[in-house]
Amino acid sequence: RAGSVSADLASANAVKRPAGRRWLSRVVVAFALVSLLAALAGLWLLRTSSGRDFVLNRAVGALPQGALRWEGVEGTLATGLAFDGLHYEADGVTVQLRRAEVRIRAAALWARELHVFNVLLASGSVVLPPPAPSEPLKRIQLPDALPKLELPFALRLDDVQVRDVSLLRERQSRAPEEPLESLVVLRNFAFAGSLRDGRIVLAKLALDSDRVAFDATGHVDSAANWATELDAAVRLPLGEGVQPLPATLAVRGDLSDLNLTLDADVGEPAHLRLSATGGLPVPRWTLEASAPKLLPQRLGAEGAPVSIQIEGQGDLQNAELHGSMAQGALRFDLEPSRISFDNGTLTLSPLALALNPGTAR
């Protein structure tokens, strides 16, 4: 009898093993089919024009009706997209571009990185709404701290280019024939850098515009009290027929001890030193500006060389200043003076000025 029971159990196990294998085989086949379908769907989205159109239509549908449109589009999500006649209009902002291109490395998304190979925005304009009415400034207030820059993914930008784009602003109650306010004309803007774990790396930051031109590199770590190391070569336009004024800018430190240095060639070396200590929200600052021999011709003017020396210290409400300026036989001295700004009121107590032998308070 015992032998019969053992035989029955063996027979039942033999039946279960093939059934278990069949179930496992079905799971494997189903998983393979799902993986294949997902791969095919991914290839369709990334490498076909119909997949491109599907994604773009979903993006347009997520925006206000009629906000985004274009005259033509080429490429795929995998090879890069190129738009002709791109137009965006929403929330008072209007963007018009003759050409816009973007190419990303889609595979990097699996590693939680948005890797953008290149972006090109060319030949167009950005129009901002008129500034909103605001109350007069009563007191300068800073936040207690700056937040850490965090994204759900790392960001890497290899090459961002903006060419021949005007930044304009609408005027309050502007007549139809009145032009828009021009803020800046970007002849060329180039950027390469990354953002990862709150750290910004500026591998390249270059701007050529009608207001200023510069080339900068550096890094900012928002996770380390915004520790900053930034260097820039600056060129300030001075008008037609006058060479741009070259200057070098350096920023070092963090929010508790930040130092800015600006050096320029105005006939002889001139410099400005600005330091902020104590951190937010109430930093203290010190200032030193010196130009022993500023040639007016270097700025497109005429006259004898000018000597300038200014020193000061203070906080967000108070400043203590003293210095001097001289040109030929004329000398102007700012004797130790105090300037305060609080509750919308500027207070000079005292303001001591000396012109040659005379003094005014």
Image (cartoon, rainbow, N blue to C red):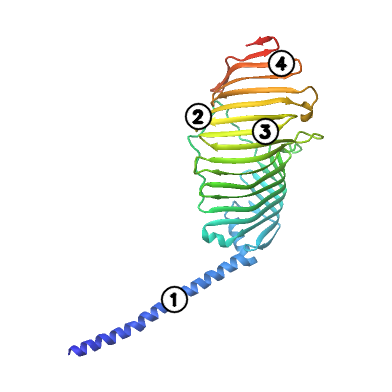
Q: Quadrant of residue 285?
A: top right
Residue at 60% over, 37% down: 251
- What x and y, as percent, mark residue 327? 75, 19
Indicate the amino acid at tag 4. Answer: Arg
Q: Quadrant of residue 42?
A: bottom right
Helix or strand or loop: what does disc 3 sit on?
strand
Return the residue nearer the eye: 205 or 306. 306
Residue with the most extreme left position = 1
137 relative to 20, above or below: above
Residue beneath disc 3: 263
Indicate the amino acid at tag 3. Answer: Asp
Residue beneath disc 4: 331
Residue with the most extreme top position = 358
Quarter containing the C terminus: top right
Residue beneath disc 1: 28
173 relative to 203, above or below: above
Contact, mark 4 vs mark 1 (Cβ under 8 Å): no
Decide: few, some or many residues near mark 4? Use Cα within 10 Å; few <14, some 14-19, many ≥20: some
Mark 4 or mark 2: whose residue is earlier in sequence = 2
Helix or strand or loop: what does disc 4 sit on?
strand
Residue beneath disc 2: 282
- What x and y, as percent, mark residue 350? 58, 14
